Every structure is written in C-alpha cells, then in structure tokens.
Amino acid sequence: MSTKPLHGIRVLDLTNVLAGPFACHQLAHMGADVIKVETVGTGDLARQLGGDVTLSKRNMGVSFLAQNPGKRSLTLNLKHASGKAVFRRLVRTADVVMENFRPGVMDRLGLGHAELMKENTRLVYCAISGFGQDGPLRDLPAYDQIIQGMSGIMSVTGAPENAPYRVGYPVADTIGGITAAFAVAAALADRRRTEGVFIDVSMLEAAMATMGWAVSNHLIADRDPQPMGNDNVTASPSGTFKTGHGLLNIAANKQEQFEAVCTVLGHPQWAQDPRFVDRHARLAHREDLRTLMEQAMAGESAEVWWARLNEAGVPAGPVYTVPQALAHPQIAGRGMLATFKEAPGVGRDIRVVRTGFKLNGQAPSVDTPPPLLGQHNDEILAELGCTPAEIQALKDERIV
C-alpha cells in the first residue's frame, strides 16, 4: 500500500490561521496536492503570527511555518473578475475546496458552493466556521477562545478554585481542522459517489463531539460536569501526584491496578481500608488517598515511581514540558519531527511536527518546506494553460 493515499488529489486551500490550514496540512501529508490560495500582498494572517518577530515581518511567521509544509502558494485577487476567472479554471482541476470564511462570504464573491459546482460537479466543498452554515449564531465571528468558552470546555477545565480555564493550546481550532480533514477524506473515499459534496463543519459542534463524559453524563445521567483539576472524574487514584521530585500522573482505573499501587507503595493494607475498598469508596475519599500516596512517594522521584508502577502494570507517566516531550526518544525516534534545511524566507533550518500516525510503518511526510507568498504563481498558472504573456498581464493588474 502507498503511504500517499491521496496522491493525485488536488485541494484548494483558501483558509487562514489554524483550523483550515491544519486540516489541509493533514491532507498534504496524505499526498494531496494542496494549493494555498492567498490574498495578494499579505497572504494568510498566520504569516504574521508566532514567537519570532523577525520571521513574522518576513511574512513567514512561526504559526504559518507549522501548518503549511508541502503546500504550494498562489496569490489571487478573488474580488476582481479576472481573479475569479482564474479561480474557476483552477476549480475545474480540483477535487476539494476548503474555506473558513464566515458563512455567506464566498457567495458574495460569486464563488459559493452552487457556483463552483457549475465548474466541477464532483467537487468536495468543505466550509469551516465557528457555528456552522445555519442557526441563530451563523453570522458571528469565532476564534478558538470563543468556542472553548461556548462549548463548555472552559467550564470543566481547571480546578474548582480557578475554573473556568482555557485549555493551553488552540484545542477547538485543532479539533475543527481534524474534523474537516476526516470529513473530506471520507467523502473522497466514497466509491459510489457520483456528485459533489458540501461539508459544513461547525467548530462549536466539533469541539462538543469530543467532550466525552462531560457531555454524556449530563445527557444520560443528568449529572452536570464540574472542574476537577488534574483528577479523573471516574476513578481514584487517577490524577496527578507529588513525588520527592516532580509530578507523576497515575491512572489506576481498575481494582487490580489500585491494589498494585498499594503494593508498590508499600501499603497493601490500603486495599482493605473501608475508605478505599472499592471504586465508589475511593471516589468519596479521594483526598485522603492522595495524602497517603504522596507521603509514601516523597522519598523517590517521579521517574523512579513511574518505572516501578509500570512494572506492576499500573498506567503512569511523568508530567513533561513541551521541550521535554519533543526531545524524548519516543517522539524523536518515530519520525514525528521533520526538518527542512535552509527553509526559504527563513534562512535557517526549521523543525515541525508531522501527523500522529504511521502507514505501513512509515510516518507520512511532505517533500517541500512552507512556501513563500506567491512562490508558485507562475508554475500553477502555467499548469492551467496560461501563456507567459497572460501571466504577466495578471501580474501587471495585481490579480496575482
């Protein structure tokens, strides 16, 4: 089996910042030819975002670099009739169009789903928005933080004394992107499909679909979720514990795992203590158990207890920083990180993450670094059959 299952698929990426670019980033790793259609002169807003101000001023911001390897960049003025005509020609060659404008923007440009279907009846059109293409909130702007708050994610994040709390990375944007990529791949995989598909991704709904017990406990058990800090709502001991040096996550979710914890920590009698004898008792006396466990673990580091608990069959792991996680052999040794030598517009090597899976033992990868703004204008226009004179005329009119 090829490790490029979307080889031969062309995706037009009209998206900005994170949710849409992340979705198309996944498709590029699967082998799709992703053409990033950007605004003339400025491009994706992410080109100005990230922790390196110098790169942001060069239109190669870190936020852009992270989500756009393997893509080609075409700048195109979609407000101009000639730009619309070029885009329509491009749509005829494409399999997918993905955009994350507010609902109605593409229609006002005259390039909405219905119009593009006239150019390509089998087109998969994916629209990512904060709230979806219909409903009372459809026209409102939405960023990750807004969705985190409105989905309920923030209400169950943090501890009782400091919640609601925002998740420390753009989780709603990322979930929206991975949902879009999954939906597009599913549409492309439909062997019986004879017509186009319109995919409506709501970031709000996509985020809520991933919230598991926080939602199902309310819907089915009529139990409203509460912020639990680092504790697992369903089991104890299952959370983050202090050791003699460092924090350790322990997830003893089964009775036999709890009994193993007691043995490893040198207190097998805890398993018979009425406060801890079964799951429900341990949940009721979670803090008592935490105090005893942390006292028992005070003599050794998190790394030592991690090894001992794992050897006894208890899921456990240290709490790492992002740099520690990236440097760990488990990540470095599986091909999760890609390096691009002397990336254009950057002037030095850059490292980025790939996908979170392998195909036939290989981590999906892309061959090219993130593109300069408009780097592939001539190449893509020539593929559409434009002559050198036509390409120059488009440049002179600032259509590209």
Image (spheres, rainbow, N blue to C red):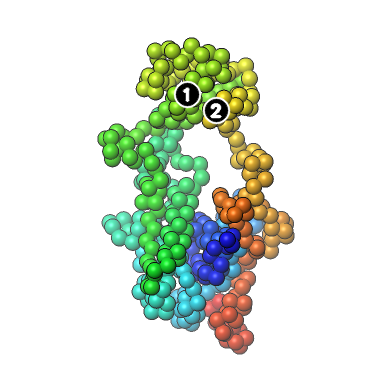
Above or below for 169 versus 373:
above
**Label 2, label 1: how far apart the Cα atoms are:** 9 Å
Residue 83 in the image: above or below residue 344: below
The part of the image, by quadrant, that contains residue 55 is bottom right
Point out which mark residue 313 bears. 2
Residue ID for mark 1: 256
Quadrant housing residue 308: top right
Relative image position of residue 398 (x, y in whole percent): 55, 78
Q: Residue 311: percent from the left, percent from the top?
A: 60, 26
User: Residue 233 location, x and y as percent?
Assistant: 40, 30
In the image, 4: left or right of 105? Answer: right
- The quarter of the displayed image where residue 61 is located: bottom right
Residue located 42% across and 67% down the image: 191
Question: Looking at the figure, which quarter contains the C terminus?
Answer: bottom right
Residue 363 shows in the view: no
Mark 1 Cα shell of 10 Å, populated few (<14), some (14-19), many (≥20): few
**Vertical position of residue 351 compared to residue 80: above or below:** above
| Residue at image location 42% in from the left, 77% down from the top | 120
Give 171 or 80, whichever is nearer the viewer: 171
As helix, strand or loop, the secondary structure at mark 1 comes to helix
x, y percentage for residue 82?
48, 82
Mark 2 nearby-residue class (10 Å; few <14, some 14–19, many ≥20): few
Residue, x 60% and y 35% (percent of image)?
320
Instruction: Inspect this view and state whether residue 170 appears.
Output: yes
| Secondary element at tag 2 | loop
Q: Are marks 2 and 1 in contact (CB under 8 Å)?
A: yes
Amino acid type of the residue tagged 1 in the rendering: Glu
| Closer to the camera in the image, 349 or 338 | 338
Q: Quadrant of the N terminus?
A: bottom right
Name above or below for residue 259 compared with residue 326. Answer: above
